[in-house]
Image (cartoon, rainbow, N blue to C red):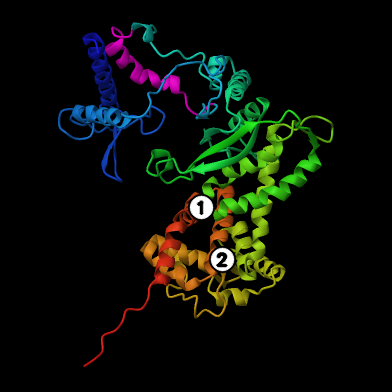
Amino acid sequence: MEPTAYANAVAVYLAFAFDKLTDTNSSLCSWQLDPPRLRTTFGRQALPMVWDFAETNPFGGGAGDYRWCIATQREVIERLGGGPPGIAVQLDAASKGMTEGAVVSTDPPYYDNIGYADLSDYFYVWLRRSLSSVYPELFTTLAVPKAAELVATPYRHGGKEKAEAFFLEGMTQAMRRLSEGVLPDFPVTIYYAFKQAENENEEGTTNTGWETFLEAVIQADFVITGTWPMRTEWASRNVGRGNNALASSVVLVCRPRSTSAGSVSRGEFVAMLKGELPKAVAHLQHSNIAPVDLAQAAIGPGMAVFSRYERVIEADGSPMPVRSALILINQVLDEGLAEQENEFDRDTRWALAWFEQHGMADGPYGDAETLSKAKDTAIAALEADGILEAKKGKVRLLPRQELAADWDPKTDNRPTVWEATQHLIRRLEDSGEESAAELMREMGSLSEIAHDLAYRLYSICEKKKWAEEALSYNGLVVAWPELTRRASSGRAKKPEQQELSS
């Protein structure tokens, strides 16, 4: 390597290290309590207001130290060694074609969620100072170019409608370019960690970002054949702490649509949706996808039905828009989750219906009695179960912490799925996984139905905006594989041989 080229390479890596140093040495850095450490400037994709900031010593050997920044660069370089050389090219995906026979896996812009070009200026200005003499052609502008960024930013395009049209046109063109060059034997995978449940109206739950993105994918003649939830999100990231943020990236699996795809009516689409979506959702649940991700993941099998046809025709002869399809998919999803109630015992069905109406708050005794007759049970029986309190003309479900601490499913004459679910969560949150797994062993087959109830309860909590309660049901499902493993391991243990007494 020529001396100049070697010096330039060293300069690039040192510039990267210095750029990383700016992330931990600004007045926007704060202190993270769990685990205790410095939180960088970009704890999330924004520059937040910080009332008080934490400082690190750039020469002190801790987080943000310049030697640490250089060491992380070295670690990346060392791990990149070996294998065939890669090729990096910067192109506009909406206007430039790809090499024929490509395998595509991409993470596109999320509508109006994050303005990466604006945020890039934070790092760009320091890279420009460090490297403009080495690569002057890359740093001709004072700030990062922004006009062509494929996001729906109203202030750049003269309003919300024009911004949406810009995004749809650009994303459709980009998707068409992808479909022209992909290998037919491999699907296109598109990461999209953008929660769909953003707007609620009389028609149902919708999200403009999802609608516009899916519209672009379908207009580019792609069929969405499924969704693969992937655990990619860091649990302790700021947006995930104490919130029902997505725990996974949902990967859309796409293939070019057949040229012989025809049309179907709205009625035919709904019939196919009701026939296919519940089975797909049951598969997702058995795969233990977190409840917080279920509605997102259900888009895949639902849109697989919608996008396999060139168009779905409404009763008035117009093509069905993606928004209408998403509303129908969410409705069928809710119906499917509700139908799972048939496997619950009658006392649990009462508790579920009461919870949906009142949560853990008091409700009129008369309403509770009417509901008990509809569910073929009785208030006295439910009180004997130990799941509710009835007094002074009021009825309320007992919170987990008020349930009998010594509950034993083996000696309970009427164990319910409701009790099983609530006690599992209580054990998990109060005593940890080993204790919860021990209770799961004692429950036997009842625990599997409790798994399904947790999904149903999470769905209710999310609609009611009961975030804290929803986290408990989501946490139980997320911990389920480990609880099952520990419970099975406990069942497999053989009794130890006792010593003979002398």
Disc 2 is placed on an element classified as: strand
Q: Is residue 456 magenta?
A: no
| Foreground of the two, 283 or 334 | 283
Residue span colored magenta: 112-135
Q: Is residue 42 above or below residue 159?
A: below
**Rendered position, 298 above or below 57:** below
Residue at mark 2: 396
Q: Is residue 344 above or below residue 206?
A: below
Callout 1 crowding tier (Cα within 10 Å): few <14, some 14–19, many ≥20: many
Whether residue 459 is visible, yes or no, is no
| Coordinates of residue 288 in the picture (x, y in percent) | 52, 53
So how many labels did they put on this image? 2
Which of the 4 quarters of the picture holds residue 56? top left
Q: Residue furthest bottom?
A: 502
Q: Is residue 18 above or below residue 414?
A: above
State the residue position of label 1.
470
x 49%, y 81%: residue? 411
Q: Which mark is residue 260?
A: none
Residue 133 part of the magenta-drawn span = yes
Hey, what amino acid is under mark 2? Arg
Tell me residue 295's x, y (percent). Answer: 59, 45
Query: x, y (%) of residue 384?
Result: 56, 77
Q: Nearer the viewer, residue 307 or 242?
A: 307
**Which residue is rendered at x = 55% and y = 14% of the image?**
96
The quadrant the N terminus occupies is: top left
Residue 15 visible? The answer is yes
Q: Nearer the viewer, residue 251 or 322?
A: 251
Query: x%, y% of residue 462?
Result: 56, 48
Circle 2 residues within 10 Å: few <14, some 14–19, many ≥20? many
